[in-house]
Amino acid sequence: MLIVLAVVQPQLALAMAVGAVLGVGVGLLALKHTHVAMSDGRRVYTPNPWIGGALTVLLVGRLAWRWTHDGLAATQAAPSALTLGLAAVLIVYSLVYLIGLMLQMRKLASAQASEPQAADQTRP
């Protein structure tokens, strides 16, 4: 829907494009700081709580700022480039992070599946 909005209102396209690029960067950073491991035969991961939390605080803070300064008219006002840019950061971050996490989990599962076979081949 953000892409459709960027086409319909081109003045917002730059903010959403910058937000998307930042979202890719933040998503890759979050993947770098996520620990993926096997525990009791299950794949588990531990995300970095600061990255997602900071993005959420930014968006909620922006929405609160807009609501306190525009009041109820904020719901009927034209979309803000800053707000939509932050929304693009969150959406693209989520997509990059989830796809990357799925790939890491799949890689971990395939490495785990190949370990017993390698151990069987080394036995005399």
Image: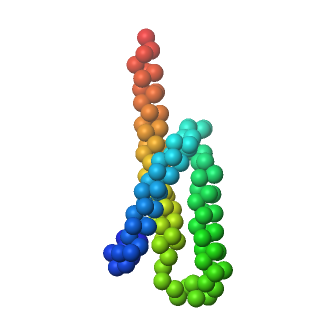
Q: Residue furthest top?
A: 124
Answer above or below: position of 32 versus 88.
above
In terms of depth relative to the viewer, which is nearer, 45 or 78?
78
Answer above or below: position of 43 versus 87.
above
Answer above or below: position of 5 versus 122.
below
Q: Report the coloring of the rendering.
A: rainbow
Q: Residue furthest left?
A: 7
Q: Residue at x 47, y 57 (%)?
A: 23
**Can you see residue 24?**
yes
Q: Position of residue 27 (x, y in %)?
A: 49, 52
Left or right of 88, for residue 36: right
Answer above or below: position of 97 versus 80.
above
**Can you see residue 41?**
no
| Number of marks present in the image shown | 0
| Quarter occupied by the N terminus | bottom left
Q: Position of residue 89 (x, y in %)?
A: 49, 61
Q: Residue at x 37, y 78 (%)?
A: 9
Q: Residue at x 43, y 11 (%)?
A: 124
Q: Residue at x 46, y 56 (%)?
A: 22
Q: Position of residue 7 (x, y in %)?
A: 33, 75
In terms of depth relative to the viewer, which is nearer, 17 or 35?
17
Left or right of 29, for residue 68: right
